[in-house]
Image (spheres, grey):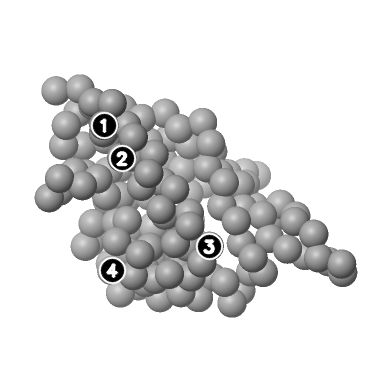
Amino acid sequence: MALTTEDHLEIYGLVARYNHAVDAGEGPAFADTFTPTGVLDAGQLVVEGRNALERFAAGLPSTQRAPRHITTNLVIDGDGERATVRAYVQMYVLAGDPPEPRLAVSGKYADQLVKAGGRWRFDRRVFTRDA
């Protein structure tokens, strides 16, 4: 069965909830965007499991000033139970004096999602930084 319009909308919402949660340091909300054994793979940094995901998100605002993740150009494929998402991402932070938004990092996501309990979650999210 192909993805429905509702599936696409929920997946877009999942991506937005992920961005808002990590930028605000809301560990439980961030971890809730993943399956219980979910993995965030950012190359040298691999974060696996709910507790580690919570700690990662809770700590981000202390290492970056006003982080803002912007995810664009989502390509969503799948069926009613599994999906993949390819997307571009940029993260801006406040930097300088006076502070102004600056691009801190850009790259792309390659995601594997599963639908469990009627809700979509990331099972594995792979971030590849632009060279």
- In the rendered structure, which amino acid carries the disc numbered 1? Glu
CA distance separating discs 4 and 3: 17 Å
Tag 2–tag 1 contact (CB < 8 Å): yes
- To which residue does mark 3 refer? 23
**Residue 71: percent from left, percent from top:** 52, 42
N-term mark: 3 or 2: 2
Tag 3–tag 2 contact (CB < 8 Å): no
**Residue 20: percent from left, percent from top:** 48, 57
Q: Is residue 17 above or below residue 53?
A: above
- At mark 1, the secondary structure is helix
Residue 84 can be seen, yes or no: no
Q: Residue at x 18, y 43 (%)?
A: 115
Sort mark 3 into few (<14), some (14-19) or many (20+) by Cα contacts within 10 Å: many
Look at discs 4 and 2 and give the one toward the viewer.
2
Kindly give the residue lying farthest to the right in the view shown: 97
- To which residue does mark 4 refer? 50
N-term mark: 4 or 3: 3
Sort mark 1 into few (<14), some (14-19) or many (20+) by Cα contacts within 10 Å: few
- To which residue does mark 1 refer? 6
- In the rendered structure, which amino acid carries the disc numbered 2? Glu
- In the rendered structure, which amino acid carries the disc numbered 4? Arg
Q: Is residue 55 above or below residue 129?
A: below
**Residue 14: percent from left, percent from top:** 36, 47
- To which residue does mark 2 refer? 10
